[in-house]
Image (cartoon, rainbow, N blue to C red):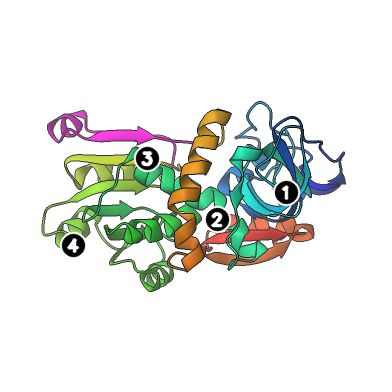
Amino acid sequence: MKAIVITRPGGPDVLATEDRPVPQPGPGEIRVRVHASALNRADVLQRRGSYPAPPGAPADIPGLEFAGEVDAVGEGAGLWAVGNRVMGIVGGGGHAEYVVIHEREGVRIPQNLGWEEAAAIPEAFLTAYDALFRQLDLKMGERLLIHAVGSGVGTAGLQLALAAGAMTIGTSRTPEKLRRAAELGLEVGIDTEREDLAEAVNQATYGSGVHAVLDLVGGKLLEASLRVLALQGRAIVVGTTGGAKAEIDLGLLLRRRVHLFGTVLRSRPLEEKISLAREFSSAVLPLLSSGRIRPVVDSTFKFTQIRKAHERMEANQTFGKIVLTW
C-alpha cells in the first residue's frame, strides 16, 4: 500500500510517499480501504518531531482519522461486512491506503455524505462531542464560548452546541472566519485582535458571563477565559496553538468554583475510544444524516499534494478541515 511517511523531523519537504506492507486484521478487527482522510495540527506537530505517535500506532505514518470501506474482516468480527462504509479515529497511520481498527471503533458513514465530507468528521466531531457533553456536560440554554471557532473542532463544536440549544459565542483573529461562522449559526463573534474578550463577553451576556468554554487555543486566552466564566463555570483545554503555558489567578479559580479540564483523544485506551464511538453513533449520526449539522471542508488535496496541504494548514487561513484523498 501507499503511505505518507515522515522521513525525518522538519518542514513539509520531509514528507514522502512510500510503499508499506498492507496490514492484516486480527481477531475482532476490520481492515478499511481508506478513500479519504484529513489533516490535523497533530500531524504538523508530529512532522516537526514534537508530538510522537502513541504506543501501537505507526511511528512515521501520520493521520488521525479516515473514511473508507471495509476491505477485510478478522476472526470473530461480526459488526461489519466487506463493502460497508465506515469512518473513525486512529492513533496514527490514517494517511495510508489501509488501516486496521477494532470493529467497535468504527462509525457508520451516513448515506448523504461522500468520502470527503465523511473524512472531515471523526477527529473534529468526536473531539467536540466528547469535550462538550461528556466532560463539560453542556446543557440547553447555557452560554458557550468557543475559541478558534473557525477551526475543525470549532465549527463542529459550534454546530453541536446549537443543536443542543446552547447560546454560542466564538472568537477568531480573522473577521472573515467570524463571518463564515455566523453563517453556521454563531450568535456572537469576537475578533480577539481588535476587541477585549472580557468586555465583549460581558456585553453579550449582560455581565452574566458564560457557563462553559471550549478552548482550542490555550496560552494567554485561558486566563482570560476564566475571567468571563460564571459561578461554577467549566472550561476545557483541547489545543495549545496559542502556547502550552498559561498564568492562572488561583484566587479567581477558588472564588468562582471553576472546573478546569484538559483532554486528548489520541492516546486514550481502546475501551474509552470504543465507548465514545458507540455513544457518538447514537447521539450524533442522526443529526448528520438529517443534515442538521454538517462537516465543514476548507479544501481538498490529493495525497500526492501532502506538502501543499501542510503548507496551507501552517498558513492559518483555513476554515474547517483540510481533506486528503487517494
Q: Disc 3, disc 2: CB below 8 Å?
A: no
Q: Disc 2, disc 4: CB below 8 Å?
A: no
Which is closer to the viewer, label 4 or label 1? 1
Q: Quadrant of residue 38?
A: bottom right
- In the rendered image, the vertical position of residue 23 relative to residue 213, given as above or below: above
- First of labels 2, 1 by sequence position: 1
Name the residue that disc number 4 marks.
204
**104 and 209: which one is in front?**
104
Name the element at disc 2.
loop
Numbered badge on residue 121: 2
Q: Main secondary structure of the magenta part?
A: loop
> Is residue 254 within the magenta segment?
yes
Name the residue that disc number 3 marks.
134
The kind of residue on which mark 1 rests is: Ala
Q: Disc 3, disc 4: CB below 8 Å?
A: no
Q: Quadrant of residue 130?
A: top left
- In the rendered image, the vertical position of residue 103 relative to residue 301, given as above or below: above
**316 and 189: which one is in front?**
189
Residues packed near mark 4 inside 10 Å, few (<14), some (14 to 19) or many (20 plus): some
The magenta region covers 240-264
The kind of residue on which mark 3 rests is: Arg
- In the rendered image, the vertical position of residue 290 relative to residue 28, given as above or below: below
**Residue at position x 56%, y 59% in the image:** 321
Whole-Å distance between the Cαs marked 3 and 1?
30 Å
